[in-house]
Amino acid sequence: MNRKIGVIYSYVLMFVEVFSATLFTPYIIRMLGPSEYGIYQLVSSITSYLLLLDLGIGNAIVRYMAKFRTENNKQKQEEFLGIATIYYFIIAIIVLIIGVVLLVIFPTAFAKGLSVEEIAIGRRLLSITMISAAITLGTSAFANTLVANERFSFSKGMTIVFTLLKVLISLIALQLGMSSVGVVMSFTITNALTRFSYVAYVLFKLKLVPKFKNINFGFIKEVVSYSSFVLLQMVATQINAMTDSVLLGMLAKDAAVIIAVYGVGAQIIQYFKTIGTHFNSVLMAGVVRLVENGAGTKALQDEMVRIGRIIFMMLGLIFTVYAVFGKHFMVLWAGADYEQGYLVAVAIMVPTMFKLVQTIGNQILWAMEKHRTQAMIQIISAVLNILLTAILIKWNPLIGAVVGTVIALTVGDVICMNVMFKSKIGICLTQYYKGLCKGILPSLLISAGAGVALKLLNLERYGWLGLIVNCAVMVVAYGICMLTFGMNRSEKNMVQGICRKILVFLHLKKRA
């Protein structure tokens, strides 16, 4: 029941984040202009690297706290929470120190790609975002404790409230002329409110108080051993997501505008990831229980197919609609100057989609503690991304950065990970992909065909109205195909159950 509630809240949060950001991003682009928006994206990328100082402990907290909860051992939960609290407090201090160092070297590092004025803006933004990163890491022990205890109603609910508040405060700040500084200050304030609400809930509602006595150093060694390889995967993911913006800032001339165009495409990818990761974020505790209870290869493969299909149903439709009408959307949404952002998004979407669909496999490897080789493969892939991007930027800054990332993601996160699933979990890839694509792939192809046919009517000349009609027809065509032959019986029952609950909630149907 908690997992179902978590999934529902995750998708409500996803809708709020994507919808609010979709409306807010064009506004911020126009208010800041290409140059300042590019600096804003660059600083966001740099700050994301500071969050790597989590060092994989966040994933370990979810795993071990879920394990102790399954064992009904509150004392071990509190002792582990104490260890994690000390760790994250130290990390928060380190983040602030590193942030100061980055402020000092920022002018030298980006002297080639940025003007003196752009560097000054970047330093002001970085001084604020590093505080936000310190707050995020300093309270991570409590945030992950909520996930381990499957308290999704509160954690996701509070995030929804503060996401809306964040956008509202940012709009006010922009209206007051505070530009990008006002935006990042708004984000920092709402981030602090969200994180401290997590702390209060764990302390006063769950009544889990960190204990700092009788620390088991042998256990710490076990946790570090587990989390060190998770860290490598986090580093690889972060490099693949953020390297392009940083390398463009360091190696390309007039980088701010190029970063802005790349950033618009990357923003679409971020929305795309949000849809996939919100579902996966509530599954780790359940996966731990599945593995702890001794699930066999067939049960794990069935779980990968079951969850992968649900994610593929949504991500496949989004990719197909965007591939057909994304260029029109990009011009309407961000402006004609950002049209090339379409290419950035549509290219990176392909490997990203497969990566997100099979994320449950990663979580199974983490729960089984068979993620070491996986981590090494992904870090090698990330290094490949850096090398390829640095070389290809000299050929064509924007396209080169995209090509390098696509190659790295395809090799590391798709091909090599499939080999890992086969060798470490025992997944039969033929059966996995057959189960994953059955009914869904034909439905996507029919939907794409409907979209291409619609292009002949040239409804794009009607602006947003034409775009909405085009996308709606594709979605309806896909929906009809899925309900007719795409979904299996379990998936149809799930959809019927959701529709029934919505009708009951709207008082259009009596509760059974």
Image: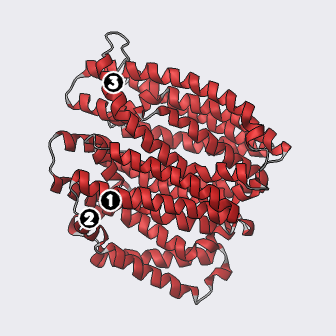
Residue 480, given in percent of the width and then of the height, sits at: 36, 78
Q: Regarding mark 3 in the picture, which secondary structure is present there?
A: helix
Amino acid type shown at disc 3:
Lys
Mark on residue 316?
none
- State the image quarter where residue 177 is shown: top right
Q: Position of residue 392 (x, y in %)?
A: 63, 62
The amino acid at mark 1 is Asn
Mark toward the start of the polypeptide (1 vs 3):
3
Which residue corresponds to the image point at 65% horizontal and 48% vertical from the top-left? 246
Report the Cα–Cα distance between label 1 and label 3.
Answer: 30 Å
Which quadrant holds the C terminus?
Answer: bottom left
Local crowd size for mark 2, using a 10 Å CA cut-off: few (<14), some (14–19), many (≥20): some
Q: For the residues labelled 1 and 2, say whether their Cβ atoms are less than 8 Å apart.
A: yes
Q: Which residue is drawn at 48% across and 47% down?
A: 236
CA–CA distance between discs 3 and 2?
Answer: 35 Å
Q: Mark 2 points at which residue?
A: 429
SS at badge 1 = helix
Return the mark for residue 221: 3
Question: Does residue 375 sit above or below 441 in this rendering?
Answer: above
Residue hosting label 1: 418
Residue nearest the viewer, comparing 186 with 302: 302
Give the crowd class for mark 1: few <14, some 14-19, many >=20 residues within 10 Å. Answer: some
**Along the horizontal axis of the image, is 495 left or right of 250?**
left
Q: Please identify the residue farthest to the top as the structure is shown.
A: 213
Q: Where is residue 159 in the image (x, y as percent from the top left)?
A: 49, 40
In-front residue for pair 261/70: 261
